[in-house]
Image (tube, grey):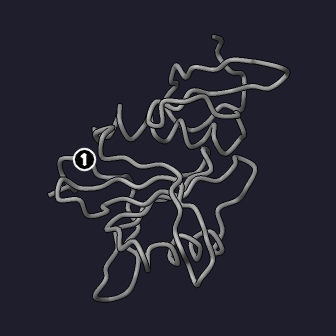
Amino acid sequence: MQFCHMEKLNFPAFNLLVKSKENKTFIFDSLRKKWLILSPEEWVRQHCIRYLIEYKGYPLGLIQVEKKLIVNRTEKRYDIIVFNRKGAISLLVECKRPNVSITQKTFDQIARYNLILNSDYLMITNGLDHYYCQMDFEQKKYIFLKDLPPFKSNMK
């Protein structure tokens, strides 16, 4: 095992398990309990998962990663969702590579996903910039937040 020297992200430092095998680098995903090829987006996703668990108190058992979703008859994959204790989706996270700017197109993507998932909160990150929104479904708009609420305050 080794520590990875990928780009420093705007997350706390985490001890993520990384290994090399056959000229490829892998990172251990503690949710899926398997080694994944380490891509820049996976680097961001694994930091985000650790952040949600260790700093925001989101229970590991309520987090799902990279599941299929059908949007306008097209198969897509969301990055991270967190359920509340009643089984409804409370948080939807979209992760991008660090060199991908967060643009209106990114917000449009997560908004399309959320038309199906109906999450109360959205997070968009490229590991360097993070945006947090609470959904106002009645007014059909985002309310931008300075930070993501901890698990206890936003989960019922």
Residue 14 percent location from the top left of the image: 50, 24
Give the camera-side residue of 88 and 109. 88
**Residue furthest left as drawn:** 156
Residue 110 percent location from the top left of the image: 53, 70
**For residue 36, side relative to residue 143 (left or right):** right
Q: Quadrant of the N terminus?
A: top right
**Residue furthest bottom as drawn:** 139
Residue 34 percent location from the top left of the image: 55, 30
Q: Residue at x 68, y 27 (%)?
A: 26
Q: Quadrant of the C terminus?
A: bottom left
| Residue 117 quadrant | bottom left
Residue 22 percent location from the top left of the image: 83, 20
Give the camera-side residue of 43 and 63. 63
**Residue furthest right as drawn:** 23
**For residue 73, side relative to residue 80 (left or right):** right
Give the camera-side residue of 92 and 21. 21
Check disc 1 and give the amino acid type. Phe
Total residue callouts: 1
Q: Residues within 10 Å of mark 1 (few under 14, many from 20)?
A: some
Q: Residue at x 35, y 64 (%)?
A: 121
Q: Is residue 150 above or below residue 18?
A: below
**For residue 65, side relative to residue 143 (left or right):** right
Q: Is residue 27 above or below residue 111?
A: above
| Residue 145 quadrant | bottom left
Q: Is residue 93 above or below residue 13?
A: below
Q: Assign a secondary structure to mark 1.
A: helix
Residue bearing the label numbered 1: 151
